[in-house]
Image (cartoon, grey):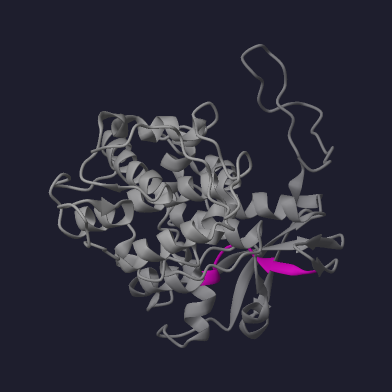
Amino acid sequence: MENLSHFKETPLITRPNGDPVPVVDYKNSNVINTYWMPIEEFLQLDEVFCQRDTEARLKKSRKYLDICIPEHVNVAVAKLTKKSTLNGKTYKAGTLFRVDSNTRAMNWAEGNSDHIPKEVHVTEYSFDNLDRIRESYNTFDSADATEKNQEKLVGIIHGIYGYEPKSQKLKKGQVLTALKHAAGFYYPDFHDAINVQARDLPGLLGSYFTELFHLDNYMTKKDHWDQSLIASALMGIKRYGTANEKFREFLIGLNEREQDTRSVHKKRYDGLTHICKEWDNPTYFKRVGTTLPEMQEQVSYILYFMNAYMDDRRLVKRDESWKTFWSKWKDFPTHQDLFSKNLNVVSHPFSKAA
């Protein structure tokens, strides 16, 4: 907390043990200031660097913002008091960021409201570093605010990693269920595949940001990527790496739902075809869901046939080992362990299915 030492001599409140609760004089602290700002100046301010996808948020909120009411005129900004650098960009001391009201600002700027205020009433918070400004943003972006965890994830991707998503899936943060299960399956000692809070998002993304940003290049057909396919692809990239040409072909095939039904033996298909056939015309999974048992089974199915595809094995059916792939995948050798000349990872030694 800021170094503010303005305490009243006689405490107004004491703790259960009798200790006084300090009273801080924020009014004279220079950390908080309030004033009126002309609307044209307010609209020129930068969004906070970890801001969510404002455009997507506006689409969902426009019906609540088409009429400007007095409550909308109260806004919050953060002032950086010392020069700081983030992702190669330097922000000068004195830079102001909008830490809330960004959706309102866009709505006003686009002329979607019945009127706009002449001025906005600003509460300005002064901090000497960008991390503290991010914390301030998160207080407005709390669980009782309108922003969802998906949008928070996009904010982290922008603000911490400086990455601009390409696919609609990642732009909207529609990978969160996949990410939490992929992290929970691969790092069970560190991540919980069931209960994920906003505070867990940086850790989840930290476990898979390389894989997620790589996968982003392949998810051009958003309807072809459900959460189990995304989770499995992330785990696949974790194992095979980003430089494996055969696995790149696998990801392209998933995106395009490619099927090769040519066979020297009836229904002996490659692993990619098994997956695409099941997801296009389900015979085993009558319902693709996102509960933990459903994700375990679906991810196991995909990983089993992914493994066969990377081994160049054509299969008729699964053997009993497939059911444990969601938990065993973390124990298989990865691209960092074993390489062949063509960058294909040596596969886990399963017996060939008939």
Instruction: Tell me which segment is drawn in magenta.
Output: 95-103
Considering the image in quadrants, where does the N terminus appear? top right
Considering the image in quadrants, where does the C terminus appear? top left
Residue at the extreme top of the image, as rendered = 17
Residue 140 shows in this picture: no
Q: Quadrant of residue 322?
A: top left
Residue at screen point 73% across, 50% down: 132
Q: Nearer the viewer, residue 125 or 339?
A: 339
In the image, residue 99 lies at what x, y percent? 62, 62
Q: Is residue 152 left or right of residue 126?
A: left
Residue at the extreme front of the image, as rendered = 264
In the image, residue 126 lies at what x, y percent? 77, 57
Residue at screen point 49% across, 39% down: 183
**Does residue 277 belong to the magenta stretch?**
no
Residue 3 shows in this picture: yes
Q: Nearer the viewer, residue 264 or 275?
A: 264
Residue at screen point 82% across, 54% down: 128
